[in-house]
Amino acid sequence: MSQKLKSFWSIAPGNLAVSLLASTSVLLTMTMGNATGGNAIASELKTAAPHQSELSVDPRANILEQVEQYHPLNLSQGGEEPLEQVNFVNQLTDVKPTDWAYTALQNLAQRHGCLLAYPDSTYRGNRGLTRYEFAAGLDACLEQIQRQLSQLDVGVAAADLETLRRLQEEFSGELTVLRRRVDALEVRTAELEANQFSTTTKLVGESIFTIADAFGSDVDAEMVFNHRTRLNFITSFTGKDSLITRLEFGNIGLSFRNPTGTNEGRYAYDGSDGNVVGLNRLHYIFPVSDRLQATIYANAGGHHFYAPTLNPLDAGGGGTGSLSRFGERNPIFRKHLGGRGVGFKYQLSPNLQANFGYLGNEAGSSNPGNGLFNGNYSALGQVVFGSRFKVGLTYLHGYDGQENTRFGLGGTGTGLGNLNLSPLGVKNTPVSSNSYGLQTSLEITPNAILSGWIGKTSARLIGLGDADILNYAVTLALPNLGSPGSMGGLVVGAEPYLTDLDVPGNPAFANDIPWHVEGFYQYQINKNVAITPGFIWLLSPNQNSENNDIIIGTFRTTFNF
């Protein structure tokens, strides 16, 4: 509190000027948040917006960022609540005698009878108040002032009013500054309300521009320039739930295909083609209890949405983080990617989490052999434990029941690793599979995280025989490398490849390790724009060392809005 304000506390108790000044100063304190004291009112005004050094009227400031913090959903205790009168300050559970405004609050309660608090006996002095709360507090104090005026004779009241007039003149500069800032905020709030998209829905957009080329003696391709755009509409009905509706369009197709025709080296953000706008994602996330969260996938579901993959390079969409699909996560998480179903995340303790879910790729079809349970499906169970060093153990059971449906792990791996066995003379057949994953992550420092995984899939080619598929990788993430928000990344591993095949005739196949080496540097120009140069190096493509290496060079630019 400024020295000017402190000097007036020496006026005789009970005086009208004291009542007005106490009421006004504490209401200003409520408006300004948890001020720490200063030498002038101007310095106290700098705390008017929590987490901001000054409530500026700079037109370049982001209106949403300044106003959104006062939205009821963002307040520390949720929405607005009716205020109740407090007769003694010790009734407030979150106010201590050591707090700098304790005396002022005590005066408002006991001496002036106009202190208001929340029904749960908290004052919440460290948060901003709404206009309704300010009006309620001001009305309570004005009512007390009016009552005191009626009890004073004309002579005393006139002297008090003269004192208040002098106070107003002395603090006219500070009051003008405050009024101007409040008026500016009201104008911005009115503009936001007049032009808001929705009271319940927020739009989050992302556009990716990519220039890419491939190099190698067997490569016959030209440089390409592709893009993909996503519009995410995030809706909340309770403040704790989220309905995510995503529209997507682009022309990147199945990414920069390598000449082997496999899924190796595919981008994490490919898929959209023809610049046709379509529904990409429709998910509803909601809490079942304090520890249990559920997600319903009506479209484009994925096990990685509810089960942590423990890879900091996994940004869940390709706009940031790893360039490739394989570099994002253990491919077993991609089983039946795009299906419909449900996922659960249960936090047993701060360092122990359980995940389980079910996805069906043909859940929207009522044809015989399809549907939610009779079509292609996968069910996952996982436990994750640890803090700085985390370990995840994953089990996934899958079934691909249509003979013309090719088994796969979400668009990663070699052709043989996806059980495309026709070159070996083996026909397509329904497949039942069990996949096992071990994921780890070690935070060496906040700016250096070492992660890795190993995954094995045991597949039963129904009516034919068995096959084993293996994949593994080590990743290194370097957050904030060079500048805040930037990141360096390295991925070294083997995409899913066939290691064993037991079918009639036991056809021979190449069993070389298809190494995948990937590096990138994501430079964050500002909070909305990032550029990422990088490369993907494929050795022994299609798990055959006789195939020449392929290098895919990439320059990705990501716009967030």
Image: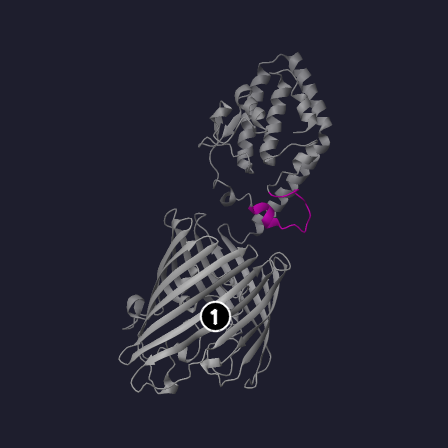
Question: Which residue is rendered at x = 53% and y = 31% of the image?
Answer: 136
Residue 66 lies in the magenta stretch: yes
Rendered location of residue 333, percent (x, y) = 41, 66
43 shown above or below 222:
above
| Numbered label tally | 1
Question: Which residue is rendered at x = 50% and y = 85% of the image?
Answer: 547
Q: What residue type is labelled 1?
A: Phe
Rendered location of residue 70, percent (x, y) = 55, 43
Question: Which residue is rendered at x = 43% and y = 62% of the image?
Answer: 439
Q: Give the range drawn in magenta.
A: 51-68
Dividing the picture into quadrants, the one containing residue 47 is top right
- In the picture, measured across the screen, residue 118 lies left or right of residue 213, that is left
Secondary element at tag 1: loop
- Residues 50 and 491: in front is 491
- Residues 191 and 420: in front is 420
209 shown above or below 146:
below
Residue 309 visible in image = no
- Residues 215 and 180: in front is 215
Rendered location of residue 433, percent (x, y) = 32, 71
Q: In which quarter of the image is the C terminus?
A: bottom right
Residue 520 lies in the magenta stretch: no
Rendered location of residue 306, percent (x, y) = 41, 58
368 shown above or below 118:
below
Residue 281 visible in image = yes
236 shown above or below 172:
below
Magenta portion: prevailing SS class: loop
Residue located beneath label 1 in the image: 326
- Residues 428 and 107: in front is 428
Q: In which quarter of the image is the N terminus?
A: top right
Dividing the picture into quadrants, the one containing residue 52 is top right
Question: Which residue is rendered at x = 46% and y = 66% of the image?
Answer: 329
